[in-house]
């Protein structure tokens, strides 16, 4: 009893057999094949080392820049808070002194609106 996966008429079996025969032909033979293989591995290793060194360099540069960026962001946030506090305060004191002061602050925040009475006929 033969298994259907090992049947020579099976398309997958035929493809695997052709791949195996091509792989056997492509094997490096002699000294030149070994030298090519060695240089390929050396080039790959050198590229890996260069990539790791560049990655570490950029990591260190990023870590070194973090305090400067943090300082700049802190200053920007302080300016934004100061601008927002000035917009809300309107340059006046912290407490409302009169009803007129309260309404003027309300106009700064919400805008001024007029309510018109409709004339009825």
Image: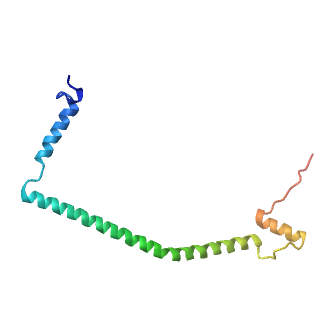
At horizontal 88% and vertical 70% (from top left) the residue drawn is: 100
Which quadrant is the C terminus positioned in? Answer: top right
At horizontal 48% and vertical 75% (from top left) the residue drawn is: 65
Quarter residue 84 falls in: bottom right
x and y percent of residue 35 in the render? 12, 61
- Colour pattern of the rendering: rainbow
Q: Nearer the viewer, residue 106 or 117?
A: 106
At horizontal 24% and vertical 62% (from top left) the residue drawn is: 44
State the count of labels.
Answer: 0
In the image, 96: left or right of 4?
right
In the image, 58: left or right of 91?
left
x and y percent of residue 95 in the render? 84, 73
x and y percent of residue 82 in the render? 68, 74
x and y percent of residue 67 in the render? 52, 76
Quarter residue 43 falls in: bottom left
Q: Nearer the viewer, residue 47 or 108?
A: 47
* Above/below status of 23 relative to 67: above
* Above/below status of 121 relative to 41: above
In the image, 83: left or right of 10?
right
Which quadrant is the N terminus positioned in? Answer: top left
Q: Residue furthest front?
A: 1
In the image, 18: left or right of 85?
left
At horizontal 23% and vertical 29% (from top left) the residue drawn is: 5
* Above/below status of 83 relative to 120: below
Q: Nearer the viewer, residue 90 or 52?
A: 52
């Amino acid at each position: 009893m033969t298994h259907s996966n090992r049947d020579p008429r099976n398309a997958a079996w035929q493809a695997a057999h052709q791949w195996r025969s091509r792989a056997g032909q492509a094997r490096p033979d002699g000294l030149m094949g070994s030298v090519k293989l060695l240089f390929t591995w050396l080039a790959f290793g050198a590229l890996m080392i260069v990539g790791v060194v560049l990655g570490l360099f950029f990591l260190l540069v990023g870590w070194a820049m973090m305090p400067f960026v943090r300082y700049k962001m802190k200053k920007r946030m302080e300016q934004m808070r100061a601008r927002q506090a000035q917009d809300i305060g309107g340059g006046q004191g912290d407490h409302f002194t009169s009803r007129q002061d309260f309404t003027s602050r309300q106009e700064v925040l919400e805008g001024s609106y007029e309510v018109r009475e409709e004339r009825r006929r």
